Amino acid sequence: MMNEKQIPLLIDPTGRQHLLENDKTTIGRAVDCDIVITSKRVSREHTQIRREGWRIYVEDLGSTNGTFLNNDRLMGPVQLRDGDRIQVGDVLFAFHDPDVTYQETPLPELDVDVSGGVVRLNRQPVALAPKEFSLLAFLFERRGEVCSKDEIGLMVWPEYQEGVFDYQIENLVRRLRAKLEPDAGEPQLLLTVRGRGYKLVLYE
């Protein structure tokens, strides 16, 4: 089958292509799903592929056995990239996007799950020390806003009632940048706002 319109698609283990032409594509055991999998390990409505402009997201629909993206269980919607592997029950789909050249970006992709304590950079897990995570979590909850050093000191070092020194905050920012920025000397995520503090910028 030719994909003449350059439409993203899923390829199942038999090599069959499933074009993702609609805004939403449902995978499950129910006969009215767009892609039907007759397996007891698959819920009636198991997984959904959703298109938003040129971005395509995969999301588990509360299935019993979960949906896995590149061996990781989905805990929320995740944007798909060319070559991703989606497992629904016993069936492994390969995602292919013919227009991938228009979607690639050099900007770092940061995902922070504050409640779960999980940080991913370009979809790879990042190990942070407790204070590093506290700083990132605070900035993430106020992403796009400038946070002063006083605010950061109170949130990250609540045990220090007398306050913390600027150099402690600056050293912590430096360590966090070393783990998150492609080039810590030219930060793209954790920015310094001269005379005011720091802010976290995330890219869609």
Image (cartoon, grey):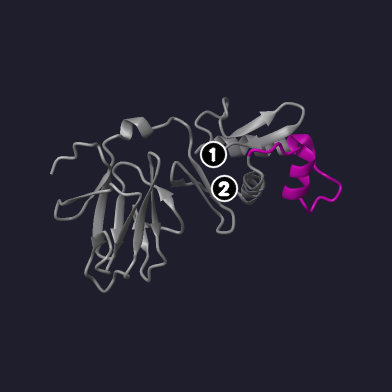
Q: Is residue 149 above or below residue 133?
A: above
Query: What kind of residue is marked 2?
Result: Leu
Q: Nearer the viewer, residue 163 or 42?
A: 42
Judged from the image, the secondary structure of the residue bearing numbered disc 1 is helix
Residue 28 is tagged as: none
Per the image, label 2 sits on a secondary structure element best described as loop
Are discs 1 and 2 less than 8 Å apart at CB? Answer: yes
Cα separation, mark 1 vs mark 2, equals 8 Å
Q: Which quadrant would the N terminus be assigned to in this image? A: top left
What amino acid type is highlighted by mark number 1? Lys
Q: Quadrant of residue 195?
A: top right
* Residue at x 28%, y 71% (from the top left corner): 41
Q: Is residue 126 in view from this perspective?
A: yes
Residue depicted at x 30% and y 41%: 82
Residue 4 position in % (x across, y down):
19, 36
Residue drawn at (28%, 48%) of the image: 20
Quarter of the figure with residue 105:
top left
Q: Residues within 10 Å of mark 1 (few under 14, many from 20)?
A: some
Horizontal side of 6 relative to 62 (left or right) equals left
Q: Quadrant of residue 166?
A: top right
Q: Which residues are magenta?
A: 144-168
Q: Position of residue 23 (x, y in %)?
A: 35, 49
Marks counted in the figure total 2
User: What's the residue at 29%, 51% (across, down)?
Assistant: 85
Nearer to us in this view, 162 or 140: 140
Q: Which residue is mark 1?
A: 179
Q: Horizontally, is 11 left or right of 49 in the view?
A: left
- Tell me the residue that label 2 is attached to: 128
